[in-house]
């Protein structure tokens, strides 16, 4: 696990500073481990900051890829950066305009706070927008906003990828916040407008096919067999079906004891998978399936209705054979009576 820091938070700044590394020796399925690194940020503070002492930056955590890893689609996270999946869905609605797109819109919700004790005009701007990503309600966000002392306000911007964007394309946009410096005393756009940026955040999204899992659970004696298929509601071409990220995590829960059993299955080239949980205790079981996603196929989840192990078991094969034998015997008796 690599921890990195970026300052200033200026949009588009690609430079990161390594903070520390943490190694996890092993992690059992369905468990978690809380990790941290000790770090004291060293930031030069200009004395002419008008009382602004809280400096904003970005902290990123990345998981290094290892051999045989199930999926690398969720190997990073970043504070103030929201990772979202854009999946197929038809026409994207907007507050100001309508954009015809095969992708659902992304609504970016964020909070903006006034760090000053006094009322302040804060400027918001959307910058570094990836080509092919259309904002729909910029007029409601971009510009100056009057904030009262220490006020925190929620904003949102809706973005829609254009129809010409390929699946698997990564898109981004950055939101910058700034204020007019009190030292300059200029707030009417005359002369040298001293607008000081003080924070910001960046959103990343990837256009994906909508992943879906269909699944059933059947019982025979003390065994539950889970069968299903990973596919897409958007008509994912066969040649784009993941070649590496085909792993489905199956979760079997005994509803009575709450004991959980996990198993990782691999789909075939068509997305089909099957696995049997054997030697189970009597009880009612619930089954869930999780797919982490790939570069072009979004994550997916499915759950099948609970099934019960134990009680009377009907062997349908023997029942069919018995019925056939009985019919033959009756036929023989009828012939003899004639």
Image (cartoon, helix red, strand yellow):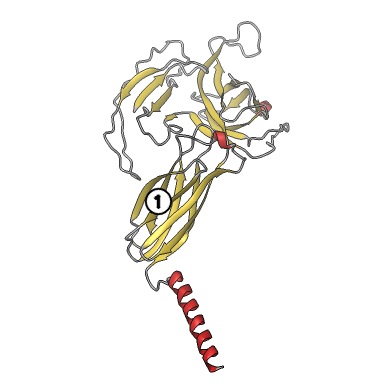
Where's the C terminus, which quadrant?
bottom right
Q: Residue furthest top?
A: 191
Quarter-of-image position of residue 282: bottom left
Is residue 58 placed above or below 82 in the rendered structure? above
Q: Secondary structure at mark 1?
A: strand
Q: Residue furthest left?
A: 25
Is residue 315 placed above or below 217 in the rendered structure? below
Q: Is residue 151 left or right of residue 41?
A: right
Residues packed near mark 1 inside 10 Å, few (<14), some (14 to 19) or many (20 plus): some
Which residue is drawn at the image coordinates 64% and 40% (left, top)?
Answer: 89
Quarter-of-image position of residue 133: top right
Which residue is drawn at the image coordinates 52% and 18% (left, top)?
Answer: 11
Which residue is drawn at the image coordinates 30% and 43% (left, top)?
Answer: 28
Where's the N terminus, which quadrant?
top left
Is residue 292 placed above or below 126 in the rendered structure? below
Q: Is residue 169 left or right of residue 244?
A: right
Q: Residue furthest bottom?
A: 337
User: x, y (%) of residue 105?
Assistant: 63, 35
- Residue identified by numbered label 1: 251
Q: How many marks?
A: 1
- Residue 147 in view here: yes
User: x, y (%) of residue 95?
Assistant: 70, 34
Which residue is drawn at the image coordinates 44% and 29% (left, top)?
Answer: 79
Q: Is residue 82 left or right of residue 164?
A: left
- Residue 152 in view here: no
């Amino acid at each position: 696990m690599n921890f990195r820091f970026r300052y200033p938070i200026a949009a588009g700044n690609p430079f990161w500073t390594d903070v520390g590394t943490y190694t996890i020796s092993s992690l059992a399925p369905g468990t978690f481990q809380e990790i941290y690194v000790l770090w004291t940020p060293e930031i030069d503070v200009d004395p002419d900051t008008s009382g602004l002492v809280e400096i904003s930056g970005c902290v990123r955590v990345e998981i290094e890829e290892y051999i045989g890893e199930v999926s690398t689609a969720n190997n990073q996270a970043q504070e103030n950066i929201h990772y979202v999946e854009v999946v197929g869905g038809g026409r994207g609605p907007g507050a100001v305009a309508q954009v015809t797109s095969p992708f659902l819109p992304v609504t970016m919700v964020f909070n903006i706070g006034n760090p000053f004790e006094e009322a302040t005009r804060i400027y918001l701007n959307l910058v570094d927008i990836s080509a092919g990503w259309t904002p729909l309600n910029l007029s409601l966000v971009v510009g100056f906003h009057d904030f009262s002392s220490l006020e925190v306000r929620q904003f949102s911007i809706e973005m829609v990828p254009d129809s010409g964007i390929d699946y698997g394309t990564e898109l981004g946009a950055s939101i910058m916040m700034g204020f007019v410096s009190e030292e300059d005393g200029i707030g009417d756009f005359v002369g040298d407008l001293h607008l000081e940026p003080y924070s910001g955040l960046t959103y990343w999204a990837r256009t994906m096919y909508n992943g879906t899992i269909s699944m059933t659970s059947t019982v025979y004696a003390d065994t539950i067999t889970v069968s299903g298929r990973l596919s897409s509601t958007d008509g994912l071409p066969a040649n784009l079906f993941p070649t590496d990220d085909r792993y489905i995590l199956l979760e079997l829960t005994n509803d009575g004891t709450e004991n959980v059993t996990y198993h990782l299955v691999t789909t075939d080239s068509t997305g089909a998978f099957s696995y049997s949980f054997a030697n189970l205790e009597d009880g009612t079981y619930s089954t869930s399936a999780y797919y982490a996603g790939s570069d072009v196929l979004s994550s997916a989840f499915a759950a099948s209705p609970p099934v019960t192990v134990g009680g009377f078991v009907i062997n349908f094969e023997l029942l069919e054979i018995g019925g056939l034998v009985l019919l033959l015997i009756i036929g023989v008796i009828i012939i003899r009576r004639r």
